[in-house]
Image: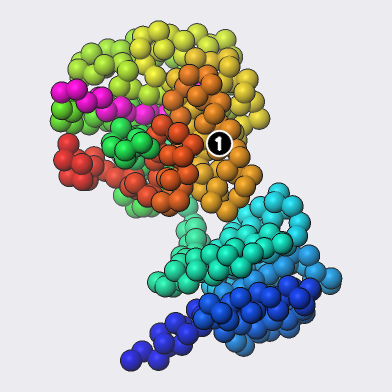
Amino acid sequence: MNTTKTVENNNKKRLLIVDDDEMVGRTLQSIARRKGFEARFTCDAERFLELVEQWKPGVLAIDLVMPGMDGVEVLRRLGEKRASACVIVTSGVGHRVLDAAVRSAREHGLHIAGMLPKPFSIGDVARLLGQCDVSSSDGPAPRKQASRTCPVVDEALLLEALDRDQFHVEYQPKVRCADGSLAGFEALARWQHPELGLIPPDHFIQVAERTELMPRLTRHLFEIAIEWFSGLQAPKAGDTPLTLAVNLSARSLEREDLVGHIRRRCQRFGLQPNQLIFELTETSAMSDAVRSLDLLTSLRVAGFQLSIDDFGTGYSSMVQLVRLPFSEIKVDKSFVMSAEFSEESRTVVRSVIELGKALGLETTAEGVETEWAMDFLCAMDCDYAQGFLIARPLDGQAVQRRWNL
């Protein structure tokens, strides 16, 4: 028997509590013991941190409001120590403060089971302890890996990559929330350098935007994606055709021949305009108000769909949504991924979906990684979802094998 593994499994049933209110701490301790946990309690934050090292509990319950060292500082220090325990954040402060504390803890790499607002019930505590017990069954949640050093991307390196055909496209599936059926794909840019390896989009997209290369890169990726998409097996008679979403940059909007070029490519590959969705981030849509309005309106007149991406993260979301002829609104993944533990995020997601419905727009949620998130979106009557729960971005061949297209 692996002794180390046995010790780790035993530690998972250990709860360590820090709270300046002894009655609250003893209550948590009592509930945990009834649920089969060993449980210890302290009112002192420094002693708590010592016990984390010595006793190695699998679950931590941390009050935010304490004299001396508050819970936020405790969470920060746990992050510095790379603590792997499952953390429950508890306090009598409002939800917005709890939400902020949980977001901060996650940024420090901690594995947060959830929030326990005071006053709490036995059921509330039991539910969170149960989540810790399940979530830790295969070990703590994986930490974000430290980013490897990426090369400095400049215009010359980008131009060379285009000339040598180093860019390719991966496709993230998009499904209908109502029944989980495949609705389409989003095309995502990938740069595989022969010597430097995979260069993330956030290291080259902004460089391309600042140079004259963005229109060329956009067109290149569009050509790859549309040719692949046109080769998919046609859906069965009566089925809604699949769609392909392609990101459209601000610099591409400066090309007056863009609409004509897109229409010609669709005709060549036998695609209907309504099968293509062009996604714009809120900031890119703002670059030239008059030109973007003309061009995007022309795209919609031609039958293409238009999506406002990352909605809720820009400073003029409502202005852009009203000003430009969008057909779809995408809920930013940051709200979707935190919705299970954040009342504030749930409110934002619900509001965006309701706004989309009121304006006659289809709604898509990004960043769907859990069954809870999918169930929540279905309950909110969201139209579409995409995220790791459904599938990670895949190359074209992998997509075709997985969905038999």
Residue drawn at x 49%, y 36% as measured from the top left: 380
* Secondary structure type for disc 1: helix
Residue 207 visible, this angle: no
In depth, the one of 204 and 312 nearer the eye is 312
In the displayed structure image, the side of residue 239 where residue 179 appears, left or right: right
Judging by the rendered image, the residue that carries numbered circle 1 is 350
Q: Which residues are magenta?
A: 237-250
Question: Which residue does the image show at 20% across and 17% down from the upper left?
Answer: 270
**Residue 307, percent from left and from top:** 45, 25
| Disc 1 packing (10 Å; few <14; some 14–19; many ≥20) | some
Residue 47 point in image, percent of width and height: 73, 83
Residue 143 shows in the view: yes
Of residues 123 and 99, the one nearer the viewer is 123
Residue 110 colored in magenta in the image? no
Looking at the rendered image, the quarter that the N terminus falls into is bottom left
Q: Position of residue 115 (x, y in %)?
A: 63, 60
Position of 204 relative to 117 (above/below): above
Instruction: Using the image as rendered, state which of residue 17 and residue 45 is in the foreground.
Output: 17
The residue sitting at the right extreme is 67
